[in-house]
Amino acid sequence: MSIRLGDTVPDFTAQSTMGELNFYNYLGDSWGVLFSHPADYTPVCTTELGRTAQLKEEFAKRNVKAIAVSVDPIDKHSGWINDINETQHTTVDFPIIADADRTVATLYDMIHPNASATATVRSLFIIGLDKKLKLSITYPASTGRNFTEVLRVIDSLQLSAEYSVATPADWQQGDDVIVALNVSTEDAEKKFPKGVRVVKPYLRYTPQPNL
Ligand code: BEZ
C-alpha cells in the first residue's frame, strides 16, 4: 500500500554502503530524504546521486539526512560510487541501501509495475522529525529530479512546522509567506511583528518570519 502524507513512515533495517543501517536510528533527530533509483551504473542516476552529494552542506544546514535506495547489491554500489565521485566531482558520503531483495522498495511502493516490473521508479520521500511523511514525489526513469526544488520544499515545510505560515506559488527564500488560514488577522498581527498585509480576508502575507 502506498504511504500517504501524514502517515508514519515504515522503519526498516537493511544493508547499505555504510554497513547495516536501521532507518529510524540513522535519521535520529533529523529530517530525512529517502529516494530511489532505477539502477546502478545508469546516467541519470549518476547525476542525481552526485548532485545530492554536492548539496551536502545545504542538507546539513537544514538538519536533513539523505539516504538512497537501489535494488542492486552492495558490491555494485561501491564500484558505482567511485564513478559518481569521479564524474560528478564530489564525494558521496550518504548511505545507499542495497535493496536486492526489494524489501524497502516494496515497503515504500517504489516499484510501479506498469512502468517497470523490476526497477524502482524515482520516488522521493521527505520525512519530518516526527517520522511522518511530509512530501512524496514520483518521477519516471527518464527525468532526473530537481534537488534545488527539494531544498526549496524542505525550507517551506520547516517554516510551516515552526510558524503558522504557508508558502505561495514559486516561493523562494526571502519572499513573503502566507498567514495560515486558522490564524485570525488579529492574532496574526500579534504573531508576526513585521506586519501583515491583507489582500483578501483569506489571503494575508507577512515577511518570512525566520529572517
Ligand atoms: C538513468 O538513470 O539514466 C536511467 C535508468 C533507468 C532507465 C532509464 C534511465
Image: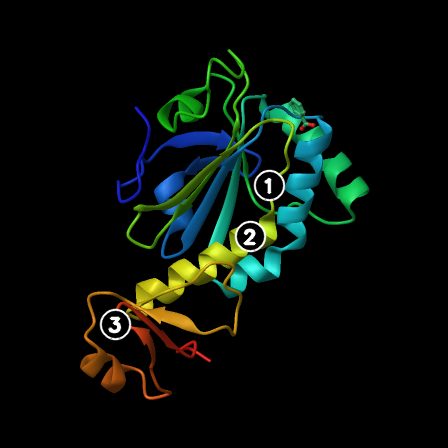
Residue that mark 3 sits on: 201
Image height check: is 190 above or below 153?
below
Query: What is the spatial separation of the Cα atoms under label 2 and label 1, in whole angstroms?
Result: 8 Å
- Give the number of the disc on residue 189: none
Could you tell whether 1 is left or right of 60 in the image?
left
Q: Amino acid at mark 3?
A: Pro
Q: Residues within 10 Å of mark 2 (few under 14, many from 20)?
A: few
Q: Residues within 10 Å of mark 3 (few under 14, many from 20)?
A: few
Please give the name of the residue rendered at 53% of the width and 56% of the height, measured from the top-left corner.
Answer: 151
Q: Quadrant of ligand 1?
A: top right
Quarter of the figure with the N terminus: top left
Residue furthest to the front:
200
Whether label 1 lies within 8 Å of ligand 1 gets the answer no
Q: Amino acid at mark 1?
A: Arg
Q: Amino acid at mark 2?
A: Glu
Q: Do the CB atoms of the residues marked 2 and 1 lie less than 8 Å apart? A: yes
Q: Position of residue 93 (x, y in %)?
A: 62, 47
Please give the name of the residue rendered at 67% of the width and 47% of the height, measured from the top-left corner.
Answer: 51
Q: Position of residue 181 (x, y in %)?
A: 24, 65
Could you tell whether 30 is left or right of 48 in the image?
left
Q: Position of residue 28 (x, y in %)?
A: 37, 52
Image height check: is 114 above or below 93?
above
Write down the quadrant of residue 5 in the picture: top left
Residue that mark 1 sits on: 145
Q: Earlier in the sequence, mark 3 or mark 1?
A: 1
- Nearer the observer, 63 or 26: 63
Query: What is the spatial separation of the Cα atoms under label 2 and label 3, in whole angstroms?
Result: 30 Å
Inspect this view and state whether residue 63 appears. no
Residue that mark 2 sits on: 149
Write down the quadrant of residue 85 in the picture: top right
Mark in front: 3 vs 1: 3
Q: Earlier in the sequence, mark 2 or mark 3?
A: 2
